[in-house]
Amino acid sequence: MRRTPLIAAVCAVAATVLAAVPAVASASSSKSDVVELPISFQVANTNRTAVPCASDGAEHTVRGTLVAPREALESGDAATLYLHAVTWGEYYWRFQEVPGYDAAHQLAEQGHVSVTIDRLGYGDSDRPAGYGTCIGSEADVAGQMVDALRSGDYELDGAEPAAFDDVFLAGSSVGALIAHTAAYTFGNVDGVVNMSWGDFAVSPFTGAALTDVLARCALGGDPGADPGYAAIFRGQQDRFYFSSATPDVRDAVPALNPDPCGQLASIPAAVAADVVGLGLIDVPVLVVFGDADSVFLPPAAAQQSLRYLGSPEVTTVTIADASHFPLVEANHLDAVAALDEWLDRNGG
């Protein structure tokens, strides 16, 4: 139900939670056996959004993993599609290099279906030319994947594809900007998770990093990377990624992936569109920020939460001692618990 801006703003403030929720239950209390199956989507890299940016328009394959309790996969009740940030891959949501950090598996133990993918230009998914993909086309692709999860029109190794009744869309950092754009453009999701994206309160550290990477993009990209690809925050991974992360996690997290320059260059235009479109999101929203985020400084979480004027419920959770990427920090289970509780409350 669409709310008036005044009523929705009051509801958003009333729903805001400024403390982390308790950690998730251990594996011993898991609800079911967990399956992890390769998944792929055939998509058109088109841009039907309000973000003015170019894409190649070609057919591509997006690849990832479906992680679910077996009976939830068979029932087809609900699934959440997770979009990673720049420089990462689907492994952000399935970080298996250090025991205890695989969020998708932990959520499956609590009954949730997660679909984690490498976005176009990353990991095992297709790699368009560096300027052949942008934030607008990534949002279009995300919208297509949501529709595919609803219809069962995707490839799944090891099981019959389910047609899910409800589909939620979650994103980390720029992945959340993409999720916003898809949600207000296509209106086909049942809830949105914003993990660490703020349209305002950008730190000088972030502004300098974007200026630097766009200069490298203008010269053709980073040496050794595909043409038109360059890694934002190059040489500053530790500050970008971590606050309270343990040494073994810091050592195990892979180096920065080069990003498609077209995606990086379209971020300002996507933010401008987000300012206009964010109030059109009329489903529940979860906002999760770390209180030691070097990319968006406080009060970014509170500012962002107040802008979902069309949402019937906005929940904000702040993770103590966490950076821009709470799922690899010391209190990462608080972030998983926030997802678990919110999905439970909203039918996910």
Image (cartoon, helix red, strand yellow):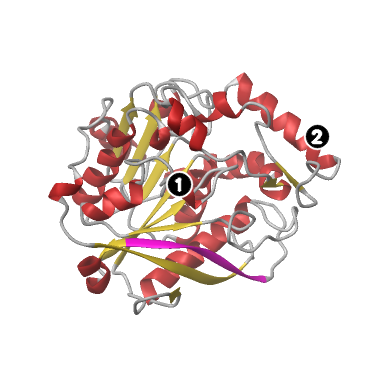
Quadrant of residue 295 in the image? top right
**Is 144 left or right of 193, judged from the image as shown?**
right
> In this view of the protein, can residue 202 be seen by the observer?
no
Residue 164 appears at what percent x and percent y? 31, 70
Q: Disc 2 marks which residue? A: 215
Magenta range is 59-67
Residue 125 vs residue 207, the one in the foreground? 125
Residue 189 appears at what percent x and percent y? 38, 59
Q: Disc 1 marks which residue? A: 171
Of helix, strand and loop, which one carries label 1? Answer: strand
**Is 240 left or right of 184, judged from the image as shown?**
right
Question: What is the distance, in whole Å, between disc 2 and disc 1 at their CAs?
Answer: 26 Å
**Is 1 left or right of 169, judged from the image as shown?**
left
**Is 224 left or right of 198, judged from the image as shown?**
right
In the image, residue 56 above or below residue 50: below
Q: The N terminus lies in which quarter of the figure?
A: bottom left
Residue 265 appears at what percent x and percent y? 71, 43
> In this view of the protein, can residue 87 be seen by the observer?
yes
Q: Residue furthest right?
A: 219
At label 2, the amino acid type is: Ala
Question: Is residue 256 highlighted in magenta?
Answer: no
Circle 2 packing at 10 Å, graded few (<14), some (14-19), many (20+), is: few
